[in-house]
Amino acid sequence: MIYFDNAATTKPCDEAVKAVSDALKTNWSNPSSLHGLGLKAEQAVNSAREIIAKSLDTDSECIYFTSGATESNNLAIFSTAKTIGRHKKKIVTTAIEHPSVLQPIKYLEENGFEAVYVKPDKSGEINPADIVSAVDDNTCLVTCQLVNNETGYILPISKAYKAIKRLYPKVITHCDCVQGFMKLNVSANSLNSDLISLSGHKIYGPKGVGALYVKKGVRVLPVNFGGGQEKGVRSGTEAVPNIAGFGVAVEAFSKSIDKRYEKMCELSNYLFKQTETVEGVKVNKFSESSPYIASVTVDNIKSETLLHYLEQNGIYVSSGSACSKGKKSGVLKAFGYDDRAIDSTIRLSFSYENKMSEIDEFIKQVKNAQAELVKIGQKRN
């Protein structure tokens, strides 16, 4: 099996699997319980909190656990709407965000908020000045991802947020850092972000757990209510096994970010060079992009058709965001792709386990697909 769909989810590392299993077997108590077993569970949660805080170069009290990045994004957006948004009704974002950002904003638009969706310019990239110029005195929130999940494009949010904070210090800045965390060297300070969303299953940890970084002094109101866990920000009994697995995964990979990045650059560059030799195949490149994600257009073959052809030959890719469930990509549309290119674009996303020989096999099977599928399509026409 060749797995090139790591942006959708990663294979849990051995350390995370062991941490989850151990917690389920021996540390299954409720962290809110006052007895010794409860204290042990609470210590496991706090240990993971400290590990994740350290990875962002911040304090553990700034980390709040959630069920995943979708909840973290929703919490950041709706909380800001309930606080600053009572008086300021404008939200600035980009047209290439994940649905867990775009859909909450669309809901707020339907309920009296104004939203500005900054689009890529003619070069196909987001100009930080366009984000800054969209902000005004009526803006409550600016929310942008660090790395686009479909193309790997790295947004210039650090530069944009720095300028926004200088001009409008009370505006809340939020970063969906899911595809950047543990892959790029980032810190809370370097992002100039008040709120940062993270996910466990994108960094070799378990599903069902994420986190929201909240800068000291920033007020976050809960979206759901209950027992007051996570200092009242996110009620609900903490998922100790998942949280433990998340923390251990961060700890396991924190020291190898640079090394893994170099390997991903080698893989990404190799893919680019190999596709240059194949007619009708193009890697869609940007001046600033994550080597973990590659957007590849294969002319005259629908992406879903190619996806299943590759799957039959043991290669797993995606036709865009896993959350899109095969729907036509609005992200690629915003980047200026025409409908034909959108229909023929797949996403490859790498992990430290991938090899150049796997890219060779991918190229081989794409050539086979061109020979077989295009011919079939011509016969049908």
Image (cartoon, grey):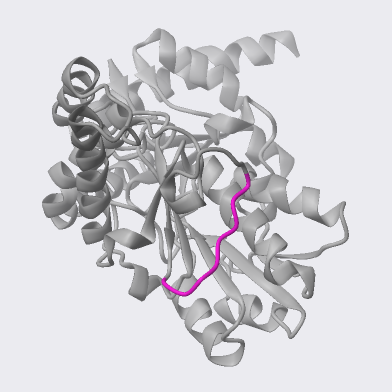
Taking the image as shown, residue 333 lies to the left or right of residue 201, namely right
Q: Position of residue 231 (x, y in %)?
A: 44, 53
Q: How many marks?
A: 0
Decide if residue 78 is in sight here.
yes
- Region rendered in magenta: 216-223
**Res. 319 image quadrant:** top right
Q: Quadrant of the C terminus?
A: top right
Q: Position of residue 111 (x, y in %)?
A: 87, 54
The foreground one among 138 and 316 is 138
Residue in the image at 53% along x and 30% along y? 322
Taking the image as shown, residue 60 lies to the left or right of residue 119, namely left
Q: Position of residue 297 (x, y in %)?
A: 53, 38
Q: Residue furthest bottom?
A: 167
Q: Is residue 219 magenta?
A: yes
| Image position of 358 with respect to 119: above or below | above
| Image position of 50 with respect to 10: above or below | below
- Magenta residues: mostly which secondary structure? loop
Q: Is residue 20 magenta?
A: no
Decide if residue 249 is in sight here.
no
| Image position of 62 with respect to 40: above or below | below
**Res. 219 image quadrant:** bottom right
Residue in the image at 66% along x and 39% along y? 329
Q: Quadrant of the N terminus?
A: top left
Q: Position of residue 189 (x, y in %)?
A: 35, 75
Residue in the image at 42% along x and 48% along y? 230
